[in-house]
Amino acid sequence: MFRLWGKLFKNNEMINDLVYEDSSDLDFLGKTKKGMEYLCYEFDLSKPMWFSENKADYQVIHKTSFYDHHFIESINFDYFEIEIIEHDI
């Protein structure tokens, strides 16, 4: 089972969160992409741009954050964070 936790923060408080679950046969990257699509749709967000620091954080500590400069559209929160809370290898 793959579980990806999406969280929206404003003024250092979590204002919304949601967990995406996937038990399909997709690889890790496929599950991450599908999870991001789901979370962005549910939170009504445009998909954020991944920069090298996001990729490094996600690979090493299994979470990363997206700030206003990661989005093309303006956002009404401080940052969007994703974190892997379960991943069977």
Image: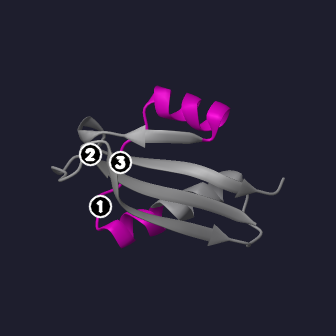
Residue that appears at 19% across and 51% down: 75
Residue under pointer 3: 48
Image marks 2 and 3: residues in contact by CB distance under 8 Å: yes
Which comes before the other along the chain, label 2 or label 1?
1
> Does 31 sit left or right of 67 as displayed?
right
Q: Amino acid at mark 2?
A: Phe
Q: CA distance from mark 2 to mark 3?
A: 5 Å
Rendered view: 49 above or below 21: above
Crowding at mark 1 (Cα within 10 Å: few <14, some 14-19, many 20+): some
Q: CA distance from mark 2 to mark 1?
A: 9 Å
17 vs 58, nearest the viewer: 17
The mark found on residue 45 in the picture is 1
Provide the secondary structure element on which disc 1 rests.
Answer: loop
Image marks 2 and 1: residues in contact by CB distance under 8 Å: yes
Image marks 1 and 3: residues in contact by CB distance under 8 Å: yes
| Region rendered in magenta | 37-62
Q: Amino acid at mark 3?
A: Pro
Provide the secondary structure element on which disc 3 rests.
Answer: loop
Crowding at mark 2 (Cα within 10 Å: few <14, some 14-19, many 20+): some
> Does 15 sit left or right of 18 as displayed?
left
Tell me residue 39's x, y (percent).
44, 65
The mark found on residue 16 in the picture is none
